[in-house]
Amino acid sequence: MLRVKELLRRFQIVVYTGNKWDDLVLMELELDDLYEEKLIEKEEYLTMKTILKSEMGALKRSENETI
């Protein structure tokens, strides 16, 4: 997730809601916007999307384990 935050900071985008899931969702939306505006390359976009999806999956798994 740190790599995604660093990428977003290059564009003066800081995401912090106090909720990790919401942060991940907002980062994904910001990433989509950057790609749609052609500000980042496809390879970088796909790499960052993979990182976010992995983080989301890990968060869901950890939440399920605590139930």
Image (cartoon, grey):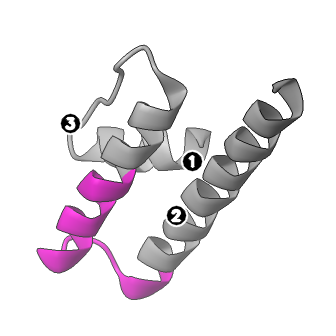
Q: What residue sits 52% from the left and 28% below the top?
A: 20
Question: Can you give x and y, in whole percent of width and height, for residue 66 in the image?
Answer: 84, 24
Where 12 falls versus 4 (above or below)?
above
Q: Are marks 3 and 1 in contact (CB under 8 Å)?
A: no
Q: What residue sits 32% from the left and 60% below the top?
A: 31
Q: In the depicted view, which residue is nearer to us: 65 or 37? A: 65
Residue under pointer 2: 48
Question: Can you give x and y, in whole percent of width and height, for residue 55 in the image?
Answer: 66, 48
Queried whether the magenta region covers residue 36, the answer comes back as yes
Where 62 falls versus 55 (above or below)?
above
Mark 1 lies on a secondary structure that is: helix
Q: Which region is colored magenta?
A: 28-43
Residue under pointer 1: 3
Q: Are marks 2 and 1 in contact (CB under 8 Å)?
A: yes
Quarter placement of the N terminus: top right
Mark sitting on residue 15:
none
Crowding at mark 3 (Cα within 10 Å: few <14, some 14-19, many 20+): few
Q: Are marks 3 and 2 in contact (CB under 8 Å)?
A: no
Q: Does residue 5 appear left or right of residue 64 in this picture?
A: left
Secondary structure of the magenta portion, mostly? helix
Mark 2 lies on a secondary structure that is: helix
